Amino acid sequence: MARFFIEMAYNGADFHGWQKQPNATTVQETLEEVLSKVFRESVSVTGAGRTDTGVHASYFVAHFDLEALPFEEKLILHKVNSLLPQGIAVYSVSGVSDDAHARFDAVNRTYEYHIVLQKNPFYSGLTYRPWFHPDIDLMNLAAERLKDYSDFTSFARLHGGNKTNLCNIEKAFWENRGDRYVFVVSADRFLRNMVRAIVGTLLEVGRGKVAVDDFSGIIEAKDRSHAGTSAPGQGLFLTDIKYPEKVFVRTF
């Protein structure tokens, strides 16, 4: 058997998240079915993480094992992408060491959350439009506080089954990208629903309902009920995953 990493992207609008589940269309199951058909053997795929229903990935990594057969990457990519639905694209298939792991070897992940302040039909399903105009400067002041903490129980999904709620957030900020505002957050790991819960709470700061100092208090409470409602999934993108160079180097 040989192990391969694949780099890919997907629009989450038509999927019930990454992880395979009964009676629902997921990215993982769809990809496994296509790879199994192309390689003519049963293929099981392990992703770098799992995204919820409606959440997107402009960059995602997964691995699978295959009987050691030589193949031409360009030809395989053509076959795979021709069979995948429009919402999923695979960009590379790279051989890696047998013990390389798409999830456990990742040392950093970056997410972005996109909001727009006016209706735009071309961003439907890819952004979130709050009904108010948030104060981005206040939201940035609050976001900066995230880097002062490591326990994010207040933003973790209840009964999420996490072994630990500790994360090291390296950057967290809002930026103006012309027709939208984007929240960028990077950490060594994320809890389920964590980014959406953070964004929902930051939006409460932006509308003046939660003070910046109170945002710190919400984190210190280590209680999900103190934080705001999670922002909708359609504005969230997984945009980058980093690995040690000895494991895998991003190719695009």
Image (cartoon, rainbow, N blue to C red):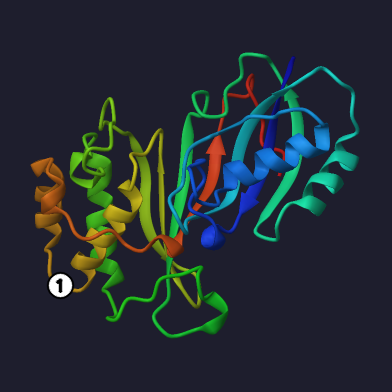
User: Label 1 is placed on what type of residue?
Assistant: Gly
Q: Count the marks: how many?
A: 1
Q: Nearer the viewer, residue 249 or 137?
A: 249
The location of residue 30, given as percent across then percent down, is: 64, 46
Q: Residue at x 12, y 70 (%)?
A: 209
Residue 7 appears anywhere in the view: no
Residue density around tag 1, few if under 14, some if 14–19, many if 20 or more, within 10 Å: some
Q: Answer left or right for 74 relative to 230.
A: right
Q: Residue at x 33, y 55 (%)?
A: 196
The residue tagged with tag 1: helix, strand or loop? loop
Can you identify the residue that label 1 sits on?
A: 208
Q: Quadrant of the C terminus?
A: top right
The location of residue 19, given as percent across then percent down, is: 50, 41
Q: Which quarter of the picture shows residue 215?
A: bottom left
Q: Nearer the viewer, residue 251 or 20?
A: 20
Q: Quadrant of the N terminus?
A: top right
Q: Answer left or right for 213 relative to 180.
A: left
Identify whether 161 is placed above or below 81.
above
Q: Answer left or right for 90 relative to 214.
A: right
The location of residue 49, given as percent across then percent down, is: 48, 37
Q: Residue at x 53, y 83 (%)?
A: 121
Q: Residue at x 85, y 46 (%)?
A: 79
| Residue furthest to the front | 23
Identify whether 184 is placed above or below 242.
below
Identify whether 163 is placed above or below 160.
above
Residue 51 appears anywhere in the view: yes
Q: Answer left or right for 87 relative to 153.
A: right
The location of residue 180, given as percent across then percent down, is: 46, 73
